[in-house]
Image (tube, grey):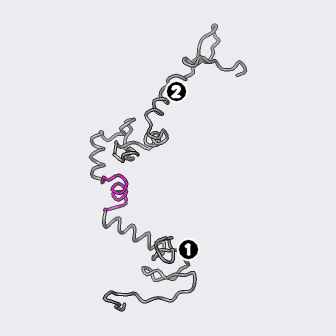
Amino acid sequence: MREQQGREVRPVLSTPEGYRCCPACGETKVLENFPRNRAARSGYGRYCKPCHNAKGQETKQRLYGGAREYHLRRRYGIGQKEFDELLAEQGGVCAICGGADPQHLDHDHRTGWVRGILCFNCNGGLGQFRDSPTRLARAITYLRGTTWQRALIHPGVYQMCSPTRGRPPSPHS
């Protein structure tokens, strides 16, 4: 490397049009093998995709101790230690259904505050209802009120009806 105005400058490598040399592995590859980067002048990242991914994994390992810790810190502002403490406070079970070994950290999407640790199904269910207590209450009302029950009309003859809707099935069914 040569010095220019007090800093080291890498020598410019001549590569054919549409190709780039990855400084990590030293291979010259087609531009499609480099990740897109709008901030770069060329529009492509400096390292090829495998080297770029390896550097990212190495950084997560070096700075955070692993991808899980990185994910928890970046997304929710807590680490694995806090996750484990919260899980212990919940008795090691899902905060909603009580299922064993929950792995999903639930949070309020408006405030970002962590609410608890849920199993996959409970976390997905809350997401499907968009964290709306009104929607959940309507779903509970629906489940309680539309359970079709068998009603005895004559000895040995039953008809399916709903207790709240009072609408029997069609005579053709």
Which residue is located at x 35 percent, y 59 percent? 70
Residue 138 inside the magenta-drawn segment: no
Q: How many marks?
A: 2
Using a 10 Å C-alpha cutoff, classify the residue at mark 1 as few (fewer than 14 neighbours), some (14 to 19) or many (20 or more). Answer: few
> Mark 2: which secondary structure?
helix
Using a 10 Å C-alpha cutoff, classify the residue at mark 2 as few (fewer than 14 neighbours), some (14 to 19) or many (20 or more). Answer: few
55 or 6, which lies in front? 6
What's the magenta region?
Answer: 64-79
Percent x, y for residue 112? 36, 48
Q: Residue furthest front?
A: 5
Q: Which residue is mark 1?
A: 32
Which residue is located at x 40 percent, y 45 percent? 110
Residue 76 inside the magenta-drawn segment: yes
Q: Quadrant of residue 119?
A: top left
Return the mark for residue 127: none
Assess whether mark 2 and mark 1 are in contact (beta carbons under 8 angstroms).
Answer: no
| Residue 144 position (above or below residue 18) | above
| Residue 51 position (above or below residue 114) | below
Which residue is located at x 36 percent, y 69 percent? 58
Q: Which residue is mark 2?
A: 142
| Residue 142 position (above or below residue 153) | below
